[in-house]
Amino acid sequence: MAAEALSQAGAPVHLYDAMPSVGRKFLLAGKGGLNLTHAEPLDDFLARYGARRPDLEPLLADFGPQDLRAWAHELGIETFVGSSGRVFPTEMKAAPLLRAWLRRLRATGVTFHMRHRWTGWTDDGALRFTSPHGEQTIAPVATILALGGGSWPRLGSDGAWVPWLRARGVDVASLLPANCGFDVGWSDHFRARFAGHPVKTVVLRCANAQGVAFERQGEFVVTETGVEGSLIYAAAALLRDEIAAMGSATIYLDLAPDATIQQLDEKLAKPRGSRSFSSYLQSRVGLKGVKVGLLRAGVATAVLHNPTQLAAAIKALPIRLLAPRPLDEAISSAGGVTFAELDEHLMLRALPGVFCAGEMLDWEAPTGGYLLTACFASGRAAGRGVLRWLKMQTAVSNL
């Protein structure tokens, strides 16, 4: 996006990429259907960026969800809104969009240099690269860094850039897993029986020590080590930070969101007779499989035989989370170059002429199109920031 903003204004642009081909992470994002953005009301959309909303809102005001859909349409890619409000290309694939985009970039003069990995600066301030032809250095009039976070090392987002920027006096918040799973510490029996099972249509509630609360309906997956999936990812930032502050975090699951606790209490008060516990729960309140397994794993045996306590457990089953999964397993990362280090056009205050964009900035968002949209918007803003800065430099040199 930065290259597009520059090349369409007539600036000569060279794009360096460590990978053998362009947009590998973009293609991976579209592996299960490219979720470009989200069609919810703008205020709700902006709220997904949490504490970083004030920093990202100006960028998204200039290039938001509707602008992104229009941009894709200009490239010949139609989009549609799914039942969840997520926006996808009609073909659900990333490759056609990427091919059309690269054709347009090349037509406007962007030169691509593949297998060129940036390794920092030389003593005189030139950019240093490793390449198939050995080490190379260049001294551009302006630089945009879009180096990713730390959650996809095999695609180049390995966070190797962090010490290089810190050495230049740039404040970089430590990279942390975002949109990640969490360890629970299941018993061997539960793990063997339920790892890989989806837990559908539940409400997850949690809160941190400061009283910030989260509540949402959705689904997640039981894993060998704990839990992951869209509902867990949506609460991941709060849970990760609570674990860092308190040593653990507890989520509460409503396993029967369509029933009140009073309704459950009345149904469970009827004698079980000769039926097994699992058969009784399925016939009385519709719980089966992994939900019953979670109940057995999450509460004392005495609770299971007390209808009132069992009803309460079904409506608020506690699960204690011990740790987030490692950064290289996460979908995205938090942390990065802090916004205090950047001016309103995403130029580093400590390094005039150097701009930053994308996931290397200190922000995070849940899945659902929010990550891609903000990356697009920040890339465009950085490209336009370079144009503004170059004009200012030309004006100064002409004085």
Image: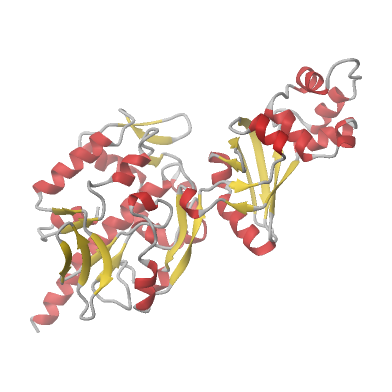
What residue is drawn where x is 20% and y is 80%?
A: 124
- In the image shown, does 154 or 309 lie closer to the viewer? 154
Image coordinates of residue 226 in percent, x first then y, are 63, 43
Q: In the image, 349: left or right of 188? A: left
Which residue is outermost to the top? 274
Find residue 142 and report its horizontal and vertical position in percent: 19, 69
Q: Is residue 67 visible?
A: no
Where residue 294 sits, quadrant-wise, is top right
Towards the viewer: 372 or 60: 372
The answer to which quarter of the image holds residue 247 is: bottom right
Residue at image coords 32%, 78%:
350
Left or right of 125 on screen, residue 360: right
In the displayed structure, does residue 206 sit left or right of residue 366?
A: right
The residue positioned 66% from the left and 36% from the top of the image is: 191
Q: Residue furthest bottom?
A: 399
Counting the numbered discs, the total is 0
Q: Is residue 174 visible?
A: yes
Rendered-image quadrant of the C terminus: bottom left
> In this view of the protein, which residue sits in the foreground, 381 or 318?
318
The colour scheme of the drawn protein is secondary structure
Is residue 318 depicted above or below 273 in this figure?
below
- Residue 221 location, x and y as percent? 59, 35
